[in-house]
Every structure is written in structure tokens, then in C-alpha cells.
Amino acid sequence: MKETFLKLINYLKNPILEKDNNKDLNYRFKVFFHILFISVLTGILITPIFSLFEEMNWISMENHKVEELFAGMNKLLIILTAGVIIPTIEEAIFRGPLTAFKTAKSFKIGFYVLTLLFGFVHITNFDMTPAVLILAPLLVIPQLFAGLALGFLRVRFGLQWSILLHGSYNCFFILLSFIPEF
């Protein structure tokens, strides 16, 4: 786990367009699950910030657009949408083009710009208020970090791995949201 975390951090300091030549599936799934764990843990650790903002009446999670999107859907359709459809579309848009940046400088710029776009497009999940606009960088931290991890996996292992990671990440939190209903 520590080795994967350090590889991720080092990669994020200087992202390069370089595939991981180790094709062993055990190795790839080990790295995948480490990155998933790191991403989920980061998301969980950041969540209390949202509760604090909501408690201070700076944001409202009541009208979150994700809840509106899933309203009236059965659980299976929610999981299919959040775990397959949305990740496939978002990964094609935000990680798919990464390999088109061939020079080191253009790749690095493309990597970070696409990550920022991915993160900040998620601000549309909130009702736009002055507080939401001011807090936007904090409100999209989970998506920004996930975007960095998704970009790392996409470049190192391929687009299908970033789709799988994105879907798994989404499903973890969707399944977690189902718990109070049991």
C-alpha cells in the first residue's frame, strides 16, 4: 500500500505519458485496490468538511443534484447509472484524451487541466449560491483527488482501468448511502 501511495505521489509531482509494462493481472488488481482504498479514504476524510459547511448554513446538501438525478430510480438502476454509465462517459471525456498529449510539457498541462475540469464540473451538483462559488475549491476536493488517481491509473494501465476505478469509487459511496435504509 505504501509503495503504491508513494508511486502515486511521485507521479502526481511529475506526470508523464508512460504505461506500466507489468501486465500481470494480480499486480494490476493490487495497485487498483490500493488506489481505490486511497481514493475512498480521502473522500471519507474530507466529508466532515461538508457537514461543517452545512451546519454553518453555507451550503445545503438537501438539494444535491445527485439525489435529484436518482430520485424515483430503483437501487439497481442507481448502481448501473453511477457505476457504469456515468463513469464511462466521464472517463471518455476527461481521461480519454490524455494520450493525445505527446510532448512532456503538453501532457503535464493536459493532465492537470483535465483533472481541474473534471473536479470543477462537479460544482454543478450544488445549487449555485455565492457561498458555493466561494467554497468551490473545497467542495470539489474529493473529485479533484479522484481525478488525479483516475488519471494515474488511466495512463499507467489504460482507460478501462480508470472506468473500473471510477465506477467502483461511485458504487462504494452509493452502497454506503443505502445503509440507513436497511
Image (cartoon, rainbow, N blue to C red):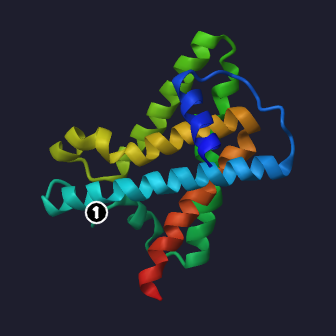
Specify whether residue 101 is in view.
Answer: yes
Residue sitting at x 73%, y 52%: 30
Q: Is residue 72 left or right of residue 14?
A: left
Q: Position of 96 compared to 130: left or right?
A: right
Q: Position of residue 168 (x, y in %)?
A: 62, 59
Q: Nearer the viewer, residue 151 or 42?
A: 42
Q: Residue at x 31, y 53 (%)?
A: 126
Using the image as rendered, state which of residue 92 and residue 180 is in the foreground.
Answer: 180
Which SS class for mark 1?
loop
**Residue farthest to the front, as pictured:** 2
Residue drawn at the location 42% of the way across and 48% of the way down: 142
Q: Which residue is mark 1?
A: 61
Q: Quadrant of residue 167?
A: bottom right
In this view, the residue in front, 72 or 151, is 151
Q: Is 93 drawn above or below residue 164 in the view shown?
A: above
Query: Is residue 37 left or right of 68 when viewed as pictured?
Result: right
Residue 84 placement (x, y as % from top left) = 65, 58
* 176 in relation to 34, above or below: below
User: Residue placed farthest to the right in the image?
Assistant: 24
Q: What residue occupies the far bottom of the structure in this picture?
A: 182
- Taking the spot 63% from the left edge, 66% from the top edge, the residue there is 80
Residue 48 percent across, percent down from the top left = 29, 59
